[in-house]
Amino acid sequence: MPLTPGPRLNRLLLPLLLLPALLLAACQDESERGTVGTEPLEAAVADPDLLPRDTPQRGSGTEDLTTHQDILAFVDALAAGSSRIERGTLGQSVEGREIPYLRISAGEFGADRDNRTLALIFALQHGNEHSGLEGTLEMALELARGDHDELLAHTDLLVVPSVNPDGADRYQRRNAADVDLNRSHLILDGVEVEALRELFHRWEPEVTLDIHEYFPWSGAWLDRGWIRLFDLQIGLATNLNTDPAIQTLAEDAFLPRAIATLEGAGFTSHNYIVGSPDGLRWSTTNINDGRQGFAILHTLSLIYEGRRERESGERIRHRAEAQRLGIETFLRFLADDGDRVRETVRDVRRRAEAGEIREVVLTMGREHGDGPLVIPVEQAEEVNGEWVVVDTVQARIDAFRPRVTRGRVAELPEAYLIPASQGEVVALLRRHRVEMEEPAVGTELRVERLRIEGFTVEELENPTRIPDVSRTPETIWTEPGDVLIPTAQLRGVLVATALEPESMHGLWRYDAFAHLGREGEVPILRVVAPEG
């Protein structure tokens, strides 16, 4: 049935609409929304004798990595052997490989959202970063056996062990269509990412964890004879549109606990840093990656970056154990602080849906902190063309810019009006499950018409070209095919980040939508409250 507009759009439009608004995204027939999570899950009576004794990698006794066929057989065995595991499929990769996922729960999955936190863990978006897969499978086996039932007392878990099976079997970063899946979360040009996000939209978990590896053998570090040594770096949501209450949970409650646990077990850990000794910072604010892409939907969203070695299977058991312990630490945090996590995330989401979030940060810069960053690194020397570690030393990084700063900020409009000529924009927002409405033809609206007058290069994460925009208020009347996108919704800040021309992460930066960033009139209008 049709749904009514949100409270901010109600105030603006209800006196003007002549026909009921049609909610295009949320009211689609289930068959139009894809099959993620709708297929019957395996419901056979669990037989513990069918549970694997070990993961495929550990059971091999070698440094061989787990293949996709091994993954499928392993998750089938988990579901057959444990009443805590249900096995489903997201769909297929570019080359037709199945992408399995697990629902893990001590009871009926998703049945008690008031008292149970729902978390999503996904690994191997990049096909050459296998420790996340291996650590995820190890933890899934332990949960299936009942080794950690206390962690499932108030948490339900969605697990996608391998988002990129085509890339994984080739040991390459990108998928079979040459798409970097962890740069696809806004544009949705990776079919595997769209399937992953469909799983999120179906359940809207309060917490997500994206598992990766970083490569420490980079030229700028080696030029100084340094190799980064952290077994597991932990990245937080750095985009300033993440609510401060959610940021506080990550920075003050989770991060110190996770680092202390890992280091107490003999692993090295740190907040996730990127760049070189000539310019170092926390990682990107861009919503096109998994962590920021879910964080902007008001989610406690984290990323793990394990250390990748030069050879694919080198030290794979150590690498996988760091990831496994990281996942266990993540789940223990949810077991201990789940009430606080749920209350915080749901309060922010409630405020978003009520239209109480009133601004969007469009550009974000980086500033130096209170002093240099001093971190341990491996000191290495090149011997006969090979780098040999000779010591561990403290590296002083003066060019460290950890502070994320606000640049251009815009007040959220009541809505965005997308004309019929911009059907590709509407189609993409539908795939993001954005709420949208068709107003009656001839509805009078007060809008701001935007015009790009030129461009300024600003020093943000890197030198970035930002449009200079003028705004002209006027009154218009809607035409056939016009679509309204209210900002009083869970995805309101996502929409604003994507559509505002001044956004450093906007749609216009992608080839398919480059026309939205050309000098001249912008085709999308900002709908504002009537004067008086």
Image (spheres, helix red, strand yellow):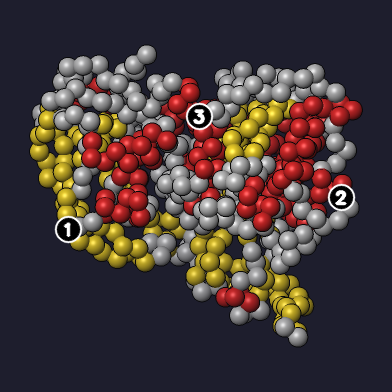
Q: Residue at point 70% right, 36% down?
A: 332
Q: Is residue 12 above or below residue 240?
A: above
Which amino acid, mark 2? Ser
On screen, residue 331 versus residue 198, left or right, reads right
Q: Find disc 2 in the rendering and name its residue.
A: 60
Whether residue 521 is visible, yes or no, is: yes
Q: Measured from the top left, where is residue 444 in percent x and y?
A: 12, 27
On screen, residue 235 versus residue 263, left or right, reads left
| Marked residue nearer the N-terminal end (3 or 1) | 3
Q: Is residue 249 above or below residue 267?
A: above
Which amino acid, mark 1? Glu
Whether residue 149 is visible, yes or no, is: no
Tell which of 519 and 291 is nearer to you.
519
Q: Find disc 3 in the rendering and name its residue.
A: 34
Q: Find disc 1 in the rendering and name its residue.
A: 453
Which amino acid, mark 3? Gly
On screen, residue 202 versus residue 132, left or right, reads left
Label 3: state its secondary structure: loop
- Where on the picture, by quarter, is residue 378? bottom right
Instruction: Indicate which label's residue lies in the foreground, 3 or 2.
Output: 3
Tell which of 261 and 466 is nearer to you.
466
Label 2: state its secondary structure: helix
Instruction: Indicate which label's residue lies in the foreground, 3 or 1.
Output: 3
Quadrant occupied by the N terminus: top left
**Looking at the image, which residue sits at the far top?**
1
3D distance between C-alphas at marks 3 and 2: 37 Å
| Marked residue nearer the N-terminal end (2 or 1) | 2
On screen, residue 514 versus residue 213, left or right, reads left
